[in-house]
Image (tube, rainbow, N blue to C red):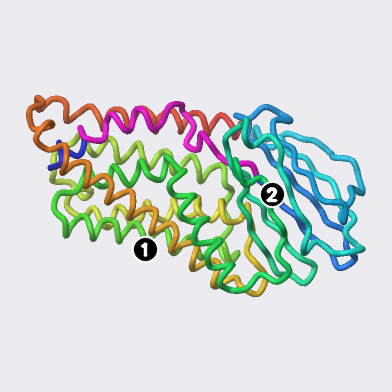
Amino acid sequence: MRRLACLGWLVLLLSWVPSSSAHPVAPALLKLHETPGGEVAVTWKQPPLRGAGALEPTFDGRCPRASEPVKRRLQGELVESWTLDCATGGLAGTAVTVSGLDEVRSEVLVFATLADGTTARGVLRPGEARWVVPVKPGPFNVAGDYLRLGVEHILEGADHLLFVLGLILLVRGWKRLALTVTGFTLGHSVTLALATLGWIRVPSGPVEVAIAASIFVLAVELTRDAGDLVHRKPWLVAAVFGLLHGLGFAGALAEVGLPKGEIPLALLTFNVGIELGQLLFVGAVLLVTAVARPLLARLPAWTERVPPYVIGSLAAYWVFERIATLV
């Protein structure tokens, strides 16, 4: 079963991570923050894989531009900031349109904070390039938005899923796999909550390095014979490494912010979304493994070593790549 899982996902692994980046197709981010006086601070971030100016946000006439954009580079991303004058009608009800989505074939996440502290989230994509800021987002809107955000984040995070894949390859038996995945879940849930609520603060740069290092350590363990602590109690090791990954999830959540007055709900549904995405991935791995079992059974035993070395090589590259961004 272990060898079949390794071989069944090797081809997917090689095609799924076409470059060294752990988040190769990150969406653009548009943040709107309204003050009681009607001024709206706009922050527009475009990932480095997208050419500057490939996407352009515009607003309807009720919120004209009040200042010229200030451009800067932040960790490789192009960041622009300016203000809008929404004193007449307010930000609620304003239409946001992003041009260029059909050409770029990507998404834009929009997060709006109204003057009264309520928040709203929208997703613009090819064919749906226009979004209207809702007047009064309710709890169901918040729950749905952050649930989907959690699912999207885990499924777009190659580093986190690569670690989960390593756990699947490490553990034999349904019961032990369930315990191990549960340990990882408990670990990252704890630090996600603590970091998001501001009870612990850890710089994101070293956290990202540590996450990549955890994947490398797991890949090394995949090449060893059973008998050490990692093989005897994989759920304990998964929980410890889960603490690191939870800090990474918290960094993503801090990027978009939490809605004032709905923080517990947003935090809970974001975490549930991560778990749903994780379960979808685990289920897909096991399903493909079962389907491909007759074919993979014919492969020689030495091919079992290939996936751990691929995982370890990618993780090592990420470690050095992320260390370089700290210098």
- Left or right of 174? Residue 283 is right
Is residue 250 rendered magenta in the image? no
Bin the neighbour count of mark 1 within 10 Å (Cα to Cα): few under 14, some 14-19, many 20 and up.
some
The circle on residue 174 is none
Is residue 23 rendered magenta in the image? yes
Image height check: is 116 above or below 91?
below
- Left or right of 97? Residue 244 is left
Q: In this figure, which residue is indicated by the disc labeled 2? A: 130
- Left or right of 190? Residue 117 is right
User: Residue at coordinates 56% horizontally, 42% vertically from top-left?
Assistant: 205
Residue 305 position within the rendered picture, expressed as x and y whole percent measured from the top left: 19, 29
Residue 178 position within the rendered picture, expressed as x and y whole percent measured from the top left: 23, 59
Bin the neighbour count of mark 2 within 10 Å (Cα to Cα): few under 14, some 14-19, many 20 and up.
some
- Left or right of 79? Residue 18 is left
The amino acid marked with disc number 2 is Arg
Q: How many marks?
A: 2
Task: Give the SS element for disc 2.
Answer: strand
In the rendered view of the protein, which quadrant contains the N terminus?
Answer: top left
Range of magenta residues? 7-28
Residue 137 position within the rendered picture, expressed as x and y whole percent measured from the top left: 66, 69
Please name whichever residue, 33 or 54, is drawn nearer the observer in this view of the structure.
54
In the rendered view of the protein, which quadrant contains the C terminus?
Answer: top right
User: Residue at coordinates 76% horizontally, 65% vertically from top-left?
Assistant: 114
Farthest residue, direction front: 127
Residue 91 position within the rendered picture, expressed as x and y whole percent measured from the top left: 80, 61
Cα gap from disc 2 to disc 1, whole angstroms: 38 Å
Instruction: Decide which of tag 2 and tag 1 comes sooner along the chain.
Output: 2
Image height check: is 253 above or below 116?
above
The circle on residue 186 is 1
User: Residue at coordinates 77% horizontally, 62% vertically from top-left?
Assistant: 93
Q: Circles 2 and 1: CB distance less than 8 Å?
A: no
The amino acid marked with disc number 1 is Leu
